[in-house]
Structures are given as C-alpha cells and as structure tokens.
Image (tube, rainbow, N blue to C red):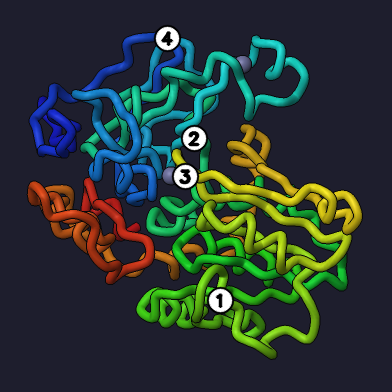
Amino acid sequence: MTEIQALVLTSGTPALRSRPSPAPHHPDDVVVRVAATGICGTDRGIVLGEFPALDGVVLGHEAAGVVQAVGTAVTEVSPGDRVVVNPTYTCGRCRPCRRGLAAHCTAKDGREIGVDRDGTMAGAVVVPERFACPIPDTVSFRRAAVIEPLACVLTNVEAAAPRPDDRVLVVGGGPIGTLCALVFAHRGVRTVLLERDATRAALARGILPDAVEVATGSGPGIGLPAGLLPHRPDVVVDTTGVLLEEALALVAAAGTVVVMGEREHARASVPLRPLVTSGVRVIGAGPYPPRLFEAAVDLAADLPLERIVTAAFPLAAYREAFAALGAPLEPGAGAGAYTAMKVLLVSDPELAGR
Ligand SMILES: [Zn+2]
Ligand SMILES: [Zn+2]
C-alpha cells in the first residue's frame, strides 16, 4: 500500500484525501493500520465549527487497529499486534506528570491527535509506542473503538466516588451518559439516566441493563419526572455540561455534582451559601490520565461496549456518518437530529469485523 485515504479538515470541512502511506519517522513510532474510529462529540463540534482544530489535520481519535510497522527502538509491540490508540499524549516530564497528575500535563497542547496532530480517520496513523496500547484477542475492534470514551467516563466516575447506598442521576443519554450509566451499573450503583431525546432514550434502553432506569425528561432544566426517585439524587453527573444550576438545586445534602460535558461558552450563577451549608461538592474531573486509559483497556474485557455502536459507515461515507449524529456537512445546514448513538467510521472493513 503506497497511499491511504484520510479524512482531512479542509477549510473547516472534512474531505477525503489521498496521503502517502505513513512509515515510522522516529525510533519510537508505531504505524497502526486503523480498523475503525468512533465519531466523538469533539469531532462533531469540529465539523460544526464549534470546536477549534488545526486546518489540514486528519480527524479522529477513538480508534483501534493492528500494528503495521514499528521504529527501531520499539520493544513492547510488534507488527500484527492488536492495539487501541491513546490519543491524549502526555510528556511524562513536566511537573504535573512527575506528580502523578498527567491528565494536566503542561505539554499537552499541540499533542492531541485528530485535533492538532494527524488522527485516525484514515487507513493508518503514526503514534509513539507509549500510546499504542495492546488489547486482548477477545476484545473486538468494534468494542475497542469505545475504549477512549470509556476512559473519559472512568475519570468522571472516579470523581463522583459514589457511596455504596448512593443513588446516581446521569443527565444526558448520549454515548458518554450511557457509558457512565453502564459503568455505575457494573459497580452495583443504583442509577437513573435522563435523556430528553426520545430516539436516544430508546437507544439507551436497548443498551443498558434493566437495573438502570432510563427516563425521558420533560419541562425546563433537567426535567426529572416527579416521583421517579424516592429522594434527591446523591450524585448528579451532568454530561450535557450546561445544567449546573439545576443540578445543584436537585442534589441531596452532602451530595456531589460532576460537571462533565465540555461546553466552550457555558456559564453558571451559583448561590454560594447553600453550597456551604449543604456540603455539596462540585467537581470537574478533567481529562483522563494514562492510568485510567489503561483501566479502560482492562475493563473493556468485561463490558459490552460495542452495544453503544449503533451505526457504522465506510470512511468514504463520512457525510452520512456525521448526518446520523445531527451534523450535516452541507453548507448552512445547521445541527440536526440524532438517529444514532455511537457511530463508527470504518477504515478497513475486513479488520473491523475482527
Ligand atoms: Zn472523544
Ligand atoms: Zn507532562
């Protein structure tokens, strides 16, 4: 293979381009033949012009595939190995990294693939060895493509730190909210998922175990149906990222609100005295550190992550793929409705079936 296809951000719009097939440039480079890439809210934001990304960059960061070639210094993986890509590069040398706070690595800007480095919506991608994480044969590529969002979720679940008898309310039933509910349920935490969009609520119901109640919100704000919970939720995870005021009005005393969705312009006005007297914690968990990416790789063996994937399109059908996420690429079309949960862009149909 001398050329690969790649989905390149071109004057703000994705376009399929031919690129030379990549080879290792640095001794620690690993070339990964990509099976499939999940489309993330970030990718949706980029193509809608709501999230900044470098023009000319290859999009995509939630991917798994097979090692195709390695640099001279690579020792931990070999051609043919199945790997998932950790797209969040950390330097391992700055003060936060040295203090075990790699999620807040100061060298991270300019090191996020699919945003400001070439990503995975392509036939192949080059990553440093440390960020090509081996996966067992038992984890399909379809499942492995969901490991990266699972790492985001684990960071927030860890921050939520529910007590054994807590009741958790997850607000927003997109892939992240649904994965949150899946992880809480896996840990035996009583969980309710609220999703306004009837299509997504129905998809979430089909994915989650019966132990998770999926409710369709109504009315302003969070819209928790009256009588759904016997008492206020002890933990509220707001995956919409815009409902902090409502979450604070709802959460039980001594409870926790996790602000999860990343919304560039979201603001909140918070009455401070109730925050003090009720002992409520408000937490932004931040990006995942490498240790929680590894935890996600490990947990993927036990969780049916592939259920989140409700649609898959070949790379060339990227327009249909984004349209399924309410992000039509026609100029001036604006945001539309979701008809899918997690959508995969398949780089290699033969690999993606394995
Ligand atoms: Zn993502
Ligand atoms: Zn660092």
Give whichever of 306, 320 is nearer the camera.
320
Q: In terms of secondary structure, where does tag 2 sit?
A: loop
Q: Does label 3 or label 2 sit earlier along the sequence?
A: 2
Confirm or deny contact between disc 1 and disc 4 (CB under 8 A).
no
The three-letter amino acid code for the residue at tag 2 is Asn
Which image quadrant for residue 265? top left
The span from disc 4 to disc 2 (Cα, nearest Å) is: 18 Å
Mark 2: few/some/many CA within 10 Å (<14, 14-19, 20+): many
Identify the mark at residue 263; answer none if there is no mark: 3
Confirm or deny contact between disc 3 and disc 4 (CB under 8 A).
no
Decide if residue 346 is on the left or right side of residue 71: left
Residue 327, how many percent across, how many down? 23, 55
Residue corresponding to mark 1: 223
Residue at the image point whose x is 50% and y is 30% from the top:
88
Which image quadrant for residue 239? bottom right
Residue corresponding to mark 4: 27
Asked if residue 227 is positioned above or below residue 299 in the image, the reply reads below
